[in-house]
Image (spheres, rainbow, N blue to C red):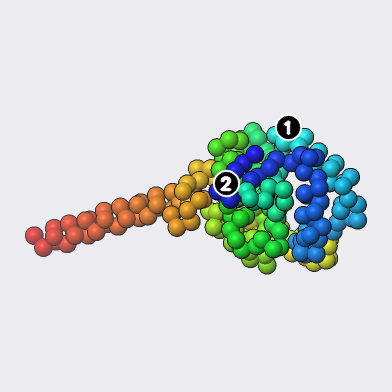
Amino acid sequence: MIETKRLLLKPASPLLVQEVLDYYLRNRDFLRPFEPERAPEFYTPEHQTDSLRQQGEAAQKGESFCYYLSLREQPEQVLGSIALNNIVRGCFQSCFLGYRLDEKNQRKGYMTEAVAAVTDYAFRELGLHRIEGNVMPRNQASLRVLEKAGYREEGLASLMKLPSCGELIFYSQSGFRSDLWSAAARYPSVKPVCDLFMTGVLSGTLIILFIFVAFSALHGCL
């Protein structure tokens, strides 16, 4: 389990089946525009039990890690989920980030808190080097979550069709590298390490250039 100031991030387990099913039933209409079309059996205890079992087995194999969010004061209710998917080892050491949150708990900073915690876990505990998040450009709330957690927008991913509505969409691709993981992930007002480095390089270059110009002017006057 991963804990934050306000949240409990519980690893996937069939023991959570009723809480997870309640979450999906509550948010069935809310999630429809952002997710693949769900068959009726998706909203059954049997399907969710099997899904949670598979997620647990994937975590044991190190293939993916899925966590379900609850408030500390309401541990019996699931507010959403967050996952590190398609983990690739070898020289890549990377994965994809996915998350979803309860409709009534939007814009409270819960998912930003969860993303920061899971990103920290991925880099420090799992030893990953890169995490990539793909979000529909129209989903501004989700894009803002990545931005506040320190992720950098890298461009648009390839065009694909969303089965739930037949719409052709692009995905906005954002990434975070472990060597850039700094206080910016938890304190957005703090500049990332790379920004501070580049600021120092540019400042030093300008100072050297100024000294060179001044010396050349002085030399020309002598």
Question: Which x, y percent locates residue 85?
Answer: 70, 44
The quarter of the rendered structure image containing the N terminus is: top right
Residue pointed to by mark 1: 61
Relative vertical location of residue 157 with respect to residue 4 in this rendering, above or below = below
Q: Which residue lies furthest to the front in this view?
A: 73
Amino acid at the residue labelled 2 = Thr
Q: Which of 167 and 146 is in front in this view?
A: 146
Residue that label 2 marks: 4
Left or right: residue 19 compared with residue 152: right
Which structural element holds mark 2? loop
First in sequence: mark 1 or mark 2?
A: 2
Viewer can see residue 171 = no
The residue located at (21%, 56%) in the rendering is 211
Q: In x, y percent, where is residue 175?
A: 59, 51
Q: What element carries label 1?
A: helix
Tell me the residue at 57%/46% (across/down).
Answer: 4
The residue located at (65%, 62%) in the rendering is 106
The crowding category of the residue bearing disc 1, from other C-alpha atoms within 10 Å (few below 14, some 14 to 19, many at least 20), is: few
Say left or right for 32 vs 83.
right
Q: Which residue does the image show at 70% across and 40% down from the upper left?
A: 11
Q: In this view, does 112 lie to the left or right of 36?
A: left
Farthest residue toward the right? 40
Provide residue 157's location: percent of width, then percent of height.
68, 57
* Foreground pick, 135 / 92: 135
Question: Does the image show residue 158?
Answer: yes
